[in-house]
Amino acid sequence: MSDNPRNSPAVEGGFRTHAEKLVGSRLESVFERCPDPWEKKLENFPKYVKRQNLTRLLAQYEIFRRVLGVKGSVVECGVLRGGGLMSWAQFSAILEPVNLTRRIYGFDTFEGFPSVSERDRGPSSEHVKVGDLYANSHDELKELIQIYDSYRFLGHVDKVHLVRGDATQTIPEFVASHQHLMVSLLFLDFDLYEPTRVALKHFFPRIPKGGIVAFDELDNPLWPGETSALLDELGIGSLKIQRMEFDPYIGFAVVE
């Protein structure tokens, strides 16, 4: 379910059929009936997670693995509930526990879309409006980050940072105050034109060769703004945009 009653179901439902949308409630029922303690349930999470969710986790893992040898931090644009952000963090803790300079930065308003431009409008996206994709996860994530730091190697060195606010303002300010920043992985999931273009303008020049820029909504009629932002800022022809064979959504390019 949406965190905010203002959200249209179509905003997060995407191309799912009615039967697919019922899967969540069916899994919830099984999860609630299971007598195991919550920790045992989470340890066995593949029992309760939809294939699409595992697909995304695997796609993120494959992308992260490709930047292990590339200098720079991970920047996620569009945190929502934080599952993706904390996946990057866990991958780093598992695969490179001594890499104390790679940080994970997450940008979001944590209040839904602050604005929607005409570049985000299309026959399949007229439902999108200000306030959509609201997820007030900021404080929860701050607490989870503290717990994450308590049991990872070199946990006294900060790893995950949240940047709250309208990204069209916070990104230029952040880059200006972090002159040392290099970006090994830029993951764009704002869905909208304006913040995506601002992110490309300020972060892409800081990606070294071998780094990756990834997009969640390219070529998606529900979210035309992301493709438009890429066209206007970099041009699609400037990048060799690839995809994982098993994932239909994420497009990524290795900077050459």
Image (cartoon, helix red, strand yellow):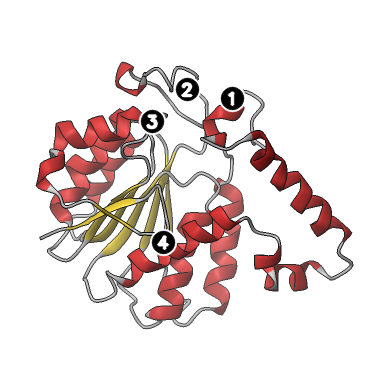
Kindly check if marks 1 and 3 are in contact, taking CB atoms under 8 A apart as contact. Answer: no
Q: Mark 3 — residue?
A: 223
Q: Mark 4 — residue?
A: 60
- Amino acid under label 3? Trp
Kindly check if marks 2 and 3 are in contact, taking CB atoms under 8 A apart as contact. Answer: yes
Kindly check if marks 1 and 2 are in contact, taking CB atoms under 8 A apart as contact. Answer: yes
Kindly check if marks 4 and 1 are in contact, taking CB atoms under 8 A apart as contact. Answer: no
The residues bearing labels 4 and 3 have C-alpha atoms spaced at a distance of: 20 Å
The residues bearing labels 1 and 2 have C-alpha atoms spaced at a distance of: 8 Å
Q: Secondary structure at mark 4?
A: helix
Q: Mark 1 — residue?
A: 8
**Residue 212: percent from left, percent from top:** 24, 59
First of labels 4, 3 by sequence position: 4
First of labels 4, 1 by sequence position: 1
Kindly check if marks 2 and 4 are in contact, taking CB atoms under 8 A apart as contact. Answer: no
First of labels 2, 4 by sequence position: 4
The residues bearing labels 4 and 1 have C-alpha atoms spaced at a distance of: 27 Å
Give the residue drawn at x 60%, y 59%: 143
